[in-house]
Amino acid sequence: MNILVLTGAGISAESGIPTFRDANGLWEGHAVEEVATPQGFASNPVLVHQFYNERRRALRSAEIQPNAAHIALAEFEQKHTARSAGDFLIVTQNIDDLHFRAGSRNVLPMHGELFKVRCLYSNKIFDWKYDLSTETLHPDDPANEELRGCLRPHVVWFGEVPIGLDRIENAASNADVFIAVGTSGLVYPAAGIVQLTKPTCRKIEVNLGDTPASDAFDECRHGKAGEILPQLLA
Ligand code: BJW
């Protein structure tokens, strides 16, 4: 049985990472086009770096740890793989590393990763845990002043193409079970993945309540991911 899981900000809410569109969401105080578009970065890189530096610092802090939902997925993957029971893939829209830290192996971060940065010129990707600024030197060529400030967060902003779309489409069309966890169903193409599954695929949505995508699912389980997933995957 092939299983595809799509996760969104809601799965990390119980770990203390704010969601985007709920009350007190991450955009609070920032218009989305200021901090999550290439145009916003071009016009005010200092603000965008500050926005991601704050989130990077929070993710490094000891308070933020994988919760019961991340752990349930990692444990389920281990059992599924040990039984050679089919494919298991987590496609996450989250840029945190909590699925990896929980022990999940097959994870595709379609909107990038907070602990990675990318060179604007070469597109080379670097692991990066600390603050980034318009003064940061290129790790490969720190003496080259022309490359000062050439790094950007390795994340997918509005108008940019998400990562791994071919693999996602393939996994969706082969899935026997599709579970969407903690995502508002507002941002595409992630919100359209459910439509790529075959008619026989069992489609389950896990969320605090209904979303605009709920009608496309066979079952909607309402409640916290950290409570529902351990039961669902037991
Ligand atoms: C819980 C819970 C608990 C809380 N337990 N649940 C018009 C129509 C259609 C599309 C477009 C359009 N105009 C523009 C577009 C395209 C655009 C788009 O979708 N815009 C919409 C806003 C309309 N999309 C893009 O631009 C994408 N690229 C693109 O389309 O490229 C073109 C292309 C595609 C395909 C092929 C070829 C070309 C890129 C989108 C990039 C999104 N980037 C961000 C920022 C990433 C970096 C960062 O983190 O800073 O990704 S935006 C933000 O939204 C972030 C998230 O991953 C994403 C989704 O949010 P998510 O995860 O759903 O969070 P929330 O807060 O919205 O919802 C949380 C949910 O959890 C809620 O439902 C709660 O109820 C629930 N919850 N606690 C369970 N404990």
Image: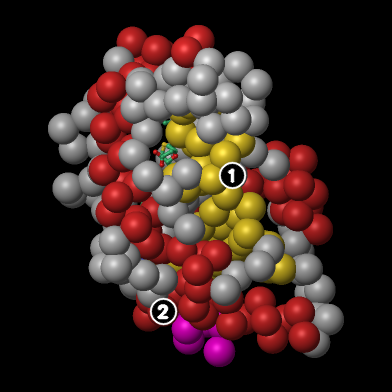
Location of mark 2 (residue): 68
**Which residue is tagged 1?**
110
Quarter placement of the N terminus: bottom right
| Label 1, label 2: how far apart the Cα atoms are | 22 Å
**Closer to the camera in the image, 163 or 210:** 163
**Residue that appears at 71% across and 48% down:** 168
125 or 145: nearer the eye?
145
Q: Which residue is drawn at 50% across and 68% down?
A: 101
- Name the residue at 77% across, 40% down: 166
Badge 2 crowding class, 10 Å Cα cut-off, few under 14, some 14 to 19, many 20 or more, is many
Judge from the rendering whether residue 148 lies leftward or rightward of residue 110; answer left or right: left
Q: Is residue 126 above or below residue 230?
A: above
- Going by the numbered disc 2, the residue's amino acid type is Ala
Asked whether mark 2 and ligand 1 are closer than 8 Å, the reply comes as: no
Where residue 108 sits: x, y (%)? 63, 53
| Disc 1 within 8 angstroms of ligand 1 (CB) | yes
Q: Badges 1 and 2: C-beta atoms under 8 Å apart?
A: no
User: What residue range appears in magenta?
Assistant: 229-234
Q: Does the magenta stretch include residue 233?
A: yes
Q: Which residue is drawn at 26% across and 32% down?
A: 50
